[in-house]
Amino acid sequence: MLVFKQIKKLRQHLDADDQRFLSIGFVPTMGALHEGHLQLMRKAKNENDLLIVSIFVNPIQFNNPEDLQKYPRTYDEDAQMLESVGCDVLFYPSVDEMYPEPEIIHYDFGLLAETMEGSARPGHFDGVAIVVRKLFDIVKPHRAYFGEKDFQQLAIIKELVRRNRIPVNIIPCPIVRERDGLAMSSRNARLTAKERAVAPKIYETLQDAVGLFPTNSPAQMKAWVRDRFQRVPAFQIDYVEIADDKMLQPLQGWSSAKGAILFVAIYLGQVRLIDNIRIY
Ligand code: AMP
């Protein structure tokens, strides 16, 4: 695996005669890799000539300085895992390399960014859009792979690509879970043993909630989920929402025209975890 920290060096490599006609599958990450990331990478490796991964803990998408500071950084383990999936190129830039000067772009994603992660984390999606656009510009991938764990982020990226006519195919990938159902996340490493023990109740609750469809309304289902979460003393609810799968707008009733997804964000101590499940 080749590792590039500089944009210029990466471009020189990719523009060389023996590389420039190869198809590129790209997986942007913030490192602290786990099986969820690796599944995206295996798919990307299978579907393209080259697998390029980036590791960049993007400061401007964090609205909480402590979350940024405590974000796990495990470069040596990450590099080994990347080798194990046959990663061809790792792009591992510094903050200065990515942002030689401050970036202040405000994207208006309209309704898409107004709910859930958009309202709970002001500025978050601007930070995501800025970095992803920049990475696409640098790597120029044919296909880019994103996890449905961050479902709203995926919708925002599709919109970013559509609006700016960026020539890349966005490939959604299903959520990868631990054996006990907890959605894999780099942040899981920050849970205490006690918190880790109750964390699977997030997904258990989501699965049970889907069983309430269609006899219960979205409002009833949400109330039921909140009630179940409130019984776990370690859980602090950030949001519970049921939204359509296109515009991510809260559903008042079960619409047959759109798919519905149940989304949650929960604090376990200092650690904020998100998850979602398709209702239909
Ligand atoms: P991150 O390093 O958290 O920014 O994630 C990088 C990519 O991996 C994003 O597209 C995430 O949606 C995806 N990802 C993270 N965790 C999972 C998971 N458990 N299942 C599927 N995709 C995931």
Image: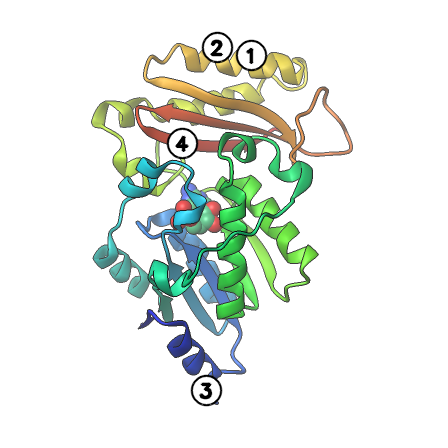
Residue mark closest to the camera, 3 vs 2:
3
Q: Which of 66/269 is in front?
A: 66
**Mark 1 or 3, nearer chain start:** 3
- At label 3, the amino acid type is Ala
Q: Within 10 angstroms of label 4, few (less than 14), some, or many (20 or more) residues?
A: many
Give the residue displayed 32% in from the left and 17% down from the top. 234
Q: What residue is shown with label 2?
A: 227
- At label 2, the amino acid type is Asp
Q: Which mark is residue 223?
A: 1
- At label 1, the amino acid type is Ala
Q: Within 10 angstroms of label 2, few (less than 14), some, or many (20 or more) residues?
A: few
Q: CA distance from mark 3 to mark 2?
A: 58 Å
Q: Quadrant of the C terminus?
A: top right
Q: CA distance from mark 1 to mark 2?
A: 6 Å
User: Does the CB distance between marks 1 and 2 fall below 8 Å?
Assistant: yes
Q: CA distance from mark 1 to mark 3?
A: 57 Å
